[in-house]
Amino acid sequence: DVEQEYNFKAWQPKHGAPDLTLLQDIDLDGIATSLATRFYRNEIYTYCGTLLIACNPFRNLGIYERENVALYRNTRFGSAPPHIFAVAEATYAGVVGGNNQSIIISGESGAGKTETVKYVLQYLTSVTNSIGWLEQQIMEANTILEAFGCACTSTNNNSSRFGKYVEVFFDSTGTICGCTLQNWLLERARVTQLKDGERSYHVFYQFLAYCTRENLQAQYRTENPRYYRYLTGSSLNSIPNVDDFRMFEKLRRAMAVMEISNSMQTAIFNVLSATLLIGNLNFCSVDDGEAVDFTSADLGLVAQICDLMHVDKLLFKKSLQFRSISVRGQQSDIPLKLQDAIANRDSTAQELYQCMFTTIIGYINKKTLPAEEGESTIGLLDMFGFECHAVNGFEQFCINYANEKLHKF
């Protein structure tokens, strides 16, 4: 019945075609009407030839259960209703046939790209009958990446602020044997600058909520979010119906599955606290505005930051007050003016966070990398969401440009 329905010679847009290529009128209005009709029937997926269009319902429709997996197992693409599982099955069939596969996931912020990656991985682990420790680690890696790489924006409560490429390896029997992650273009500016109505990375708020609830503020030198300059650029501190404390507990469980030791977790949390404290340094101008020094409050913060990071206080202070240049082998330290020192402070915090993020991904790759090279792979490209604001920063421009180039491919 499904195949007969899909082979119908033409669909009127108001009936909601399962494949847009079957529409009588393939124009903007016809496409929009067809997609809307299906959306209001809770049919959020639509084919466009070999492409799959997804309209995010922002609620659980119960269409990703075990019985849904069974519906698409060993089925030909297009012979069952449109679904992300159909795409996952087609790529897995290609892998079993000896051909490497790729899935490109693109769309505006809030389209559901990150969730789509999780559903593809869920399907692959289900059909390969390999729900073991490695598969759990692959799934929990997403939990860690969401905490450190996603944030609440004006259009999406869980927006990925980086791009990632997930490569899943399969052995000769078609069983998952490993996985690697590549990331790029992390939105560093979000660490130090916020638009009103948005939040910085989830992990900051989750970590602060956890320290408050578990009385760990003294250990990690934390305060409430309104204390930190980097978090007060926006009036939004919490997301409706989201408990940051519970989300941090979920993150800790994911770290345990990934076998991140307690000492490494402590080091990560120290970096989080230090990054926020760096933003509270103010400086004061000296030498007629030609240099900067630390205020008495700054000196207390420097002591806390250096204690958390286990770095030398004098070297840390020097790195914030001076820039070094080398001329003919001679190195000179040039004092920074106030505005330059503030820019240098923010760059330090951004670099610190990015280095931590890159280190975490490197550790995940060590844990999930296959012992031997896989016979075949499925690549999942999860692009960051494009957005168009009244004023777009350089990083948002790069994100939008990358998406446009992908659409041309």
Image (cartoon, rainbow, N blue to C red):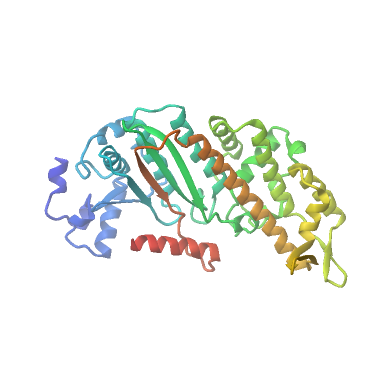
Return the residue found at the far bottom: 288
Against 281, residue 100 (above or below) is: above
Name the spot of residue 146 as percent of width and height, x first: 52, 44
Write the residue at 59% across / 52% down: 199
Write the residue at 24% across / 65% down: 27
**Is 230 placed left or right of 86 in the picture?**
right
Depth check: 220 or 349 in front? Answer: 349
**Is 198 placed left or right of 79 in the picture?**
right
Can residue 202 be spotted in the picture? no
Q: Which quadrant is home to the N terminus?
A: top left
**Is 270 placed left or right of 90 in the picture?**
right
Return the residue found at the far front: 328
Name the spot of residue 211 as percent of width and height, x first: 69, 37
Q: Quadrant of residue 84?
A: top left
Can residue 14 be spotted in the picture? yes
Against 221, residue 55 (above or below) is: below
Name the spot of residue 112 as percent of width and height, x first: 41, 48
Name the spot of residue 129 as percent of width and height, x first: 34, 27
Write the residue at 45% across / 59% down: 386
Q: Quadrant of residue 207?
A: top right
**Is 396 placed left or right of 42 in the picture?**
right
- Label count reads 0
